[in-house]
Amino acid sequence: MTPDGARLGRLCHAGKPAINTPHYVAISSRGAVPHLSQDSMRDCTSIRGIYVALEDYLEYLPANTPIYDFPCFQNESPLRQFIALQKDALLILGPRRLPPTLTPASNTYTSLSIFTSVGFRTLEVSDYVEATQKLRPDIVVSCVDVVHGGSARKLGLKRKEKMTERTLAWTKALISGLDEERPRGTGETSLWVPILPIEREMQIEYLDYLEEEDVKVGINGIVLYDIASIDAIPPSLAAIPRLALTAPANPQSILHEVGLGIDILTIPFVSTATDAGIALSFTFSAPLAQPPHVLALGIDMWSSKHATDLSPLQPGCTCYACSSHHRAYIHHLLSAKEMLGWVLLQIHNHTAIDVFFEGVRASIARGTFVEDCEAFEKIYEPELPVGSGSGPRVRGYQYQASGPINKKKNVSAYRKLDDDTPVIDDNVEKVAESISLISPSVEAKDLEHMGFGNKLE
């Protein structure tokens, strides 16, 4: 890792507070950060912007999409009003979720293959342009022809040529659509364009187009899907903000990307850790003293050792979860499958990321970023811990189908009394054993013996 290209900056948008960079934007699910209501996000976190995917709302044909007809004033964003997002948060619109679900069909020259809540379908690029015009986000990410999954490493020359041709055509269409709404560079929606995750030579036609004088004046940011593509950014666009949609796996990966010059990141592992019952515990504050042993990046709140622990999730943390509750309470909530447990963990984990980036910016300002990164790698484990619990119910886009027959990912909430079907949730194994023995004819003394009640004298 050579983190010597880290840079400080401010992301400014008309009518919104400036965001000091490097920083991150939260990833939403249907317009809300998982486990957080909009008022909880506003009152209990410092989230400054969210990424919203259009495919979250396309259950029907574009003409019948409810979000397009949501009532609002002329100068307001229907999308912002529909998801009840606070006015001072930056709203970024992209075509696909992060990370995207693999689709069986390929993209075409006029459409993207997407995954909606009712199945796979295609999104016409013209419909995406129309959606941008109607929804009026603060930032729109232009469509890109990217191959996701393992096959992305086996691209041939023909496929790379198609990626360049399609992305070029789609970017031209979006620029044309934005020009119809307002003079370029003076409107409310900022255009951020992608750099393809292929060799610079293979996308030179597209990059030359981005550097045209009448085009680059309307480009407000760069989007990267592979950190290696940062070298392909045209020199005339090197100073504008850079957004990485690369899904870093751990904070070490975040530091690596920041060191290469990334300004804004999306970090899926924050919500993944919350789902797993992990409280993030890493910091990037100076001085980073070497502890007697390597520290974990997070704390497994499913562990029974927290059952009577009255300390906060992380000493010194000022988030709502740590200042108002203790580990024993959050452990109890997770064990009882109370959704408040994940709400409190999500509040804490986003606060931990905020504090982490504050430390990163301070380190860059001091000129000690390289040394601090090296110290961080020595102090912390390279991987996030794995939660020992089962987590909340899995949403459809959180796992990939592996064939025509797949096991259920979620445990049934209710069972028949005489149903002896095995339960797949390890955390309710003991309860399941008892439930499988219950039948309508069971005696009261047997219920008492199984722990379902006590006989009153």
Image (cartoon, rainbow, N blue to C red):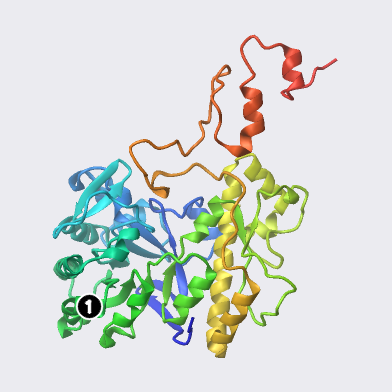
The residue most toward the top is 441
Q: Name the residue at 67% across, 68% down.
A: 295
Q: Residue at x 38, y 61 (%)?
A: 51
Alpha-carbon neighbours of circle 1 within 10 Å: few (<14), some, or many (≥20)?
many
- For the residue pair 453 and 76, the one nearer the viewer reads as 453
Observer able to see residue 239: yes
Q: Which residue is mark 1?
A: 218
**Percent x, y for residue 212?**
16, 83
Q: Is residue 10 left or right of residue 311?
A: left
Q: Is residue 444 above or below residue 121?
A: above
Which quadrant of the structure image shows residue 119? top left
Q: Give the SS element for disc 1.
A: loop
In-image side of 69 versus 280 (left or right): left
Where residue 333 appears, as percent x and y from the top left, is 65, 44
**Looking at this view, is 178 or 151 the one in front?**
151
Residue drawn 53% across and 85% down? Answer: 364
